[in-house]
């Protein structure tokens, strides 16, 4: 057995903050004890990590990533090797990525493909959700099998007609199935049929720049779809998790449902909290760097999202990491914003950006850990192994320096993408050391991990419901 002691830090979980030493035996947390206590002094660890003046936090859980995703005529630029390595650099030790069912094909085939993409390449642990592109009798039956083997959440799209889109009947059937098997339906809530009309009209009128991507994908069409998804879930008797909420009006629908006591949950992403339509309007096609769906919104929406995170109308912040290089990928949409591949990089930046919100007084330290670690772990059936530091949990631990200053930049990040959505942004706080199941993957700002260390993690059903 290998033992590690982390001494002198402030241990922060969603539940509490305490000055404690942490004992790790092999890949698990074995004990916490007050520094200097007889218990802590009795540990004779093989190695000791000094966390004096630092935070000791659970590794981040990023429940929304798209590594190696074919999309928009190209593929996201981070694969499972580069993407999970960048995640580790940023203090994230578990991701849940989206396996994709191709139209006309079985879920099993898509899931097998994603297992093949990830196996042997990951630096940190990973699980899968399943994107349903073709809801029919046979794919509905397959959902039960997926839940049994640990793929317990399914994403449906009300957007992207002809690609991922499901109609209301398909959505209702999938929700009914989830109500029966314990699965959690994740919804991309935008009225894609209406949006496509507005896209066509904008292009016909010569409005082809990236900023029109934000104008046609209206907040009201996000709110309408969110409302509809909630009502369909009520009819089906299923829980609902709305991904990448960006519009204040959509958040209001979630808040109203939650006030009624409905099992409705919401996620937002750093890009909606820190970026806005001002970025989409950057000249010389630079706005393409910020094209994602749901789109960035006018700045006013940010305050509503922060409030939702404080009041628990939003539970989770994930990245929706789906990077495309500006050169050669985002450029596919020059002269036609609808051809810009949708998605932003961020897997490496999430923990730091949310810590910056702590520094600015928007959220508390414990809420930071809750929305970035504990809540996503519980939401997607990874607790108590992931998302917390307590005896028996996986030793996925970050030593975080809350005082270090850094400047986010493509010149220094580790994501395989040629720009940063946060280029030049100064933040206070930086990951120093990262353990994944007790193995050091980042050692005082040096990468010491390896492809293949990360394991596939089958998940239980949503722990918010049991
Ligand atoms: O623009 C985005 N969000 N790209 C990834 C796919 C999705 O809808 O989450
Ligand atoms: Zn022992
Ligand atoms: Zn989506
Ligand atoms: Zn996504």
Image (tube, helix red, strand yellow):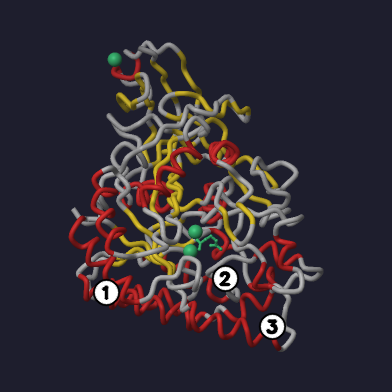
Helix, strand or loop for disc 3? helix
Confirm if mark 3 falls within 8 A of ligand 1: no
| Quarter of the image where the N terminus is located | top left
Q: Which residue is depicted at the point 51% across and 32% down?
A: 123
Q: CA distance from mark 1 to mark 2?
A: 26 Å
Residue ID for mark 3: 203
Circle 1 packing at 10 Å, graded few (<14), some (14-19), many (20+), is few
Residue ID for mark 2: 295
Circle 3 packing at 10 Å, graded few (<14), some (14-19), many (20+), is some
Q: Quadrant of residue 451?
A: top right
Q: Position of residue 13 (x, y in %)?
A: 37, 42
Q: Position of residue 136 (x, y in %)?
A: 31, 65
Vertical side of 343 occupied by 262: above or below: below
Q: Which label's residue is closer to the chain start, 1 or 2?
A: 1
Vertical side of 36 occupied by 347: above or below: below
Q: Which mark is residue 259?
A: 1
Q: Which label's residue is closer to the chain start, 2 or 3?
A: 3
Q: Position of residue 409 (x, y in %)?
A: 71, 48
Confirm if mark 2 falls within 8 A of ligand 1: no
Q: CA distance from mark 3 to mark 1?
A: 40 Å
Helix, strand or loop for disc 1? helix
161 or 155, nearer to the observer: 161
Q: Which label's residue is closer to the chain start, 3 or 1?
A: 3
Q: Position of residue 339 (x, y in %)?
A: 66, 68
Q: Which residue is depicted at the point 76% across and 69% down?
A: 334
Helix, strand or loop for disc 2? loop
450 or 409, nearer to the observer: 450
């Amino acid at each position: 057995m290998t033992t590690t002691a982390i001494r002198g830090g402030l241990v922060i979980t969603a539940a509490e903050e305490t000055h404690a030493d942490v004992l790790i035996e092999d890949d698990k947390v074995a004990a916490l004890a007050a520094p200097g206590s007889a218990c802590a002094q009795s540990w004779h660890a093989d190695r000791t990590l000094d966390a004096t003046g630092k935070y000791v936090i659970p590794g981040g859980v990023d429940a929304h990533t798209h590594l190696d995703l074919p999309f928009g005529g190209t593929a996201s630029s981070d694969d499972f090797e580069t993407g999970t390595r960048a995640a580790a650099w940023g203090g994230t030790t578990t991701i849940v990525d989206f396996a994709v069912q191709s139209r006309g094909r079985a879920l099993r085939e898509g899931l097998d493909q994603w297992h093949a993409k990830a196996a042997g390449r990951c630096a940190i642990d990973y699980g899968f959700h399943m994107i349903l592109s073709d809801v029919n009798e046979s794919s509905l039956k397959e959902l039960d099998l997926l839940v049994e083997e640990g793929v317990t959440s399914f994403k449906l799209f009300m957007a992207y007609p002809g690609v991922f889109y499901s109609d209301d009947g398909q959505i209702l059937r999938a929700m009914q199935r989830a109500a029966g098997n314990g699965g959690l339906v994740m919804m991309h809530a935008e009225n894609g049929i209406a949006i496509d009309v507005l896209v066509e009209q904008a292009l016909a009128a010569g409005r082809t720049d990236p900023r029109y991507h934000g104008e046609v994908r209206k907040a009201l069409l996000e709110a309408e779809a969110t409302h509809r998804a909630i009502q369909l879930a009520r009819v089906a008797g299923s829980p609902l998790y709305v991904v990448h909420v960006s519009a204040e009006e959509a958040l209001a629908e979630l808040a109203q449902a939650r006030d009624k006591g409905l099992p409705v949950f919401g996620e937002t992403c750093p890009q909606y909290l820190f970026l806005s339509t001002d970025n989409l309007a950057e000249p010389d096609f630079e706005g393409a760097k910020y094209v994602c769906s749901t789109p960035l919104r006018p700045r006013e929406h940010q305050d509503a999202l922060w409030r939702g995170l404080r009041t628990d109308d939003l539970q989770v912040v994930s990245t929706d990491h789906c990077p495309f290089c500006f050169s050669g990928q985002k450029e596919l949409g020059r002269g036609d914003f609808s051809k810009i591949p949708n998605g932003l990089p961020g897997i490496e930046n999430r923990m730091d950006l949310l810590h910056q919100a702590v520094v600015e007084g928007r959220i508390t330290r414990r809420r930071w850990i809750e929305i970035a670690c504990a809540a996503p772990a519980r939401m997607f059936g990874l607790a108590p192994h992931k998302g917390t530091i307590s005896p028996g949990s996986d030793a996925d631990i970050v030593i975080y320096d809350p005082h270090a200053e850094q400047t986010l930049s493509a010149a220094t990040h580790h994501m395989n993408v040629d720009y940063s959505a946060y280029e030049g942004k100064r933040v206070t706080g930086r990951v120093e050391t990262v353990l994944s199941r007790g193995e050091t993957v980042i050692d005082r700002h040096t990468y010491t991990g390896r492809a293949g260390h990360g394991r596939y993690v089958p998940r239980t059903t949503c722990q918010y419901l049991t």
